[in-house]
Image: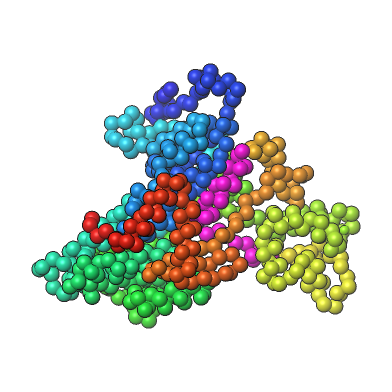
Amino acid sequence: AAASSGGLVAYADSGSDAAVEKPQLPQRKKVVVLGTGWGGTTFLRNLDTRLYDVQVISPRNYFAFTPLLPSVTSGTVEPRSIVEPIRRILEKKGGEIKFWEAECFKIDPQNKRIHCRSDLGTNLEGNGEFLVDYDYLVVAVGARTNTFNTPGVVENCHFLKEVEDAQKIRRSVMDCFEKASLPFLDEEERKKNLHFVVVGGGPTGVEFAASLHDFVTEDLAKLYPSIQHLVKISLIEAADHILTMFDKRITHFAEDKFGRDGIDVKTGYKVVKVAKDAITMQNPATGDISVPYGMAVWSTGIGTRPFIVEFMKQIGQGNRRVLATDEWLRVLECDGVYAVGDCATINQRRVMEDISEIFKVADKDKSGTLTVKEIQDVLDDIYVRYPQVQLYLKSKQMNGIADLVRSAKGDAEKESVELNIEEFKKALSLVDSQVKFLPATAQVASQQGQYLARCFNKMKDAEEHPEGPIRIRGEGRHRFRPFRYRHLGQFAPLGGEQTAAQLPGDWISIGHSSQWLWYSVYATKQISWRTRMLVVSDWTRRFIFGRDSSC
Ligand code: FAD
Ligand code: MG
Ligand code: MG
Ligand code: MG
Ligand code: MG
């Protein structure tokens, strides 16, 4: 079923024989999913695939459990244990889902089709390029590593994003140790080879530094007794502290622990150049300093993939840094395209943009003023549509809207409980300061994938109520609530069987007990019983025999 069109091979998914097999579902809409990471895979696992003609495109034919990637760099967990073939996941869904191992390189929203390229061989028809039509496109392609255009990074640093990266890092660590052991090296050269530099003090950089330190002290020190005292691990961070997204207590604990462990934490240093054997960093006090190194891992944040940047220009989002969606995860100004996870960000609607409409809807008796009761009646809808209102009240320790009304009226008029439009505006003028951007985490991506699948499962409703659930801005009742993120907490493994955990309600726990919590959470979160077994047996093997140093 391949027809040629404009030099490309058009994949025509005419359901000529499908119509015979499934007469009860004559015209299912085409859903095309880009990416098999956290967002895409969770979407697929929750989608009712009988309702759609589903096609999945990703250059990777497996899902990878990224939170365990740092463990792969030290051989605590084997790469095979954290990946699950996407075809196995799809097979479990029953029904027919098509998977293509290829990369999307262009989205054409006018014609509702995407351009893809497979690099499985050079003698493919049309250079392996093909077109896929969609009714709905779910973009879940994640992000790329951001080098901030620092010279030499791409050539000389490792990244830690994919399973291959983790495997390469592991090999490179072992190479550095073997190189440093060679007979003809002088002390300086040995030292250089054993200097491991981690750039970026976020959760990934910190966890990698910690797991490298464990690997070195628990396993490699015994195997390389004559050079083990020359090992140095440096963690470089441009901000004043590491783990700034965590509570201060965790940041301080981590910095202290790394200090005791002998990990050199250099905060306030910005890496400006990475040459083949020296890394140059800048600090206002010291100026430029260059240090020799054996291996460097770059982990400073993420950026938008180039083909998404192109897509953004096409749809008038060229001035943004990240692809923007509304709170229903629909890409702004682009019919039929949705985006989840690291590749997108939610553009939270501001209260102040809608303030006059909110006032009109709330003012049921058309008196031109709002009573506390009138505000209270629409408050639940406001909370759903504008979560920042609730966050604002909480941040000001206000118990409810009455407090807000009183604060707008000023102390003198405590008794007066009616607000005109100007007073209403004043009362809510600061709430938008509480708009929060969601972090680029697996937790966010998977919750978004799950939410979107549920919306798709009820898409008929959505078509009848295209504006979503807002009563404030739209007409009538709506079926879907906007996406709402539930933060379940976050871990920061710090090595030596110690982990910091920040759980909802600012509950902080640091130490060995949270390490056990970490083990159990990550065992539970495995995508299949197969990977769960493998991961747990890897951990057990490590406890008994230590980590393997052959590479
Ligand atoms: P990804 O999971 O990156 O998936 C993107 C998918 O798109 C991949 O399958 C990719 O192959 C595919 N793709 C790429 N380009 C194209 C294209 N052109 N066409 C089609 N498909 C394409 N988060 C946590 O919550 N907790 C943690 O402990 C944690 N630890 C982490 C540790 C490391 C080392 C890393 C790198 C990340 C960690 N994260 C963690 C973050 C988490 O992995 C990401 O936020 C999450 O993977 C985002 O999901 P996603 O679906 O948006 O993208
Ligand atoms: Mg994905
Ligand atoms: Mg992933
Ligand atoms: Mg996002
Ligand atoms: Mg009124």
In the visual, does 386 lie left or right of 163? right
The residue located at (74%, 54%) in the rendering is: 381
Task: Find out whether residue 62 is within the magenta segment.
Answer: no
Q: Position of residue 424 (x, y in %)?
A: 79, 64
In this rendering, the answer to whether 205 lies above or below 164 is: below
Quadrant of the frame with the C terminus: bottom left
In the visual, does 232 lie left or right of 54? left
Q: Position of residue 402 (x, y in %)?
A: 81, 67
Front-most of 330 and 111? 330
The residue located at (67%, 49%) in the rendering is: 481
In the visual, does 372 lie left or right of 38? right
The residue located at (34%, 30%) in the rendering is: 126
In this rendering, the answer to whether 511 lies above or below 164 is: below
Q: Position of residue 256 (x, y in %)?
A: 42, 78
Task: Find out whether residue 440 is within the magenta segment.
Answer: yes
Quadrant of the frame with the N terminus: top left
In this rendering, the answer to whether 182 lies above or below 142 is: below
Work out which residue is located at the far left of the displayed protein and give it: 184
Residue 52, visible in the rendered structure = yes
Q: Give the extent of the magenta segment.
A: 431-457
Q: Position of residue 401 (x, y in %)?
A: 78, 65
Residue 307, visible in the rendered structure = no
Quadrant assignment, res 184: bottom left
The residue located at (75%, 56%) in the rendering is: 380
Front-most of 521 and 244? 521
Magenta highlight: main SS: helix
Work out which residue is located at the far bottom of the displayed protein and give it: 285
Front-most of 85 and 193? 85
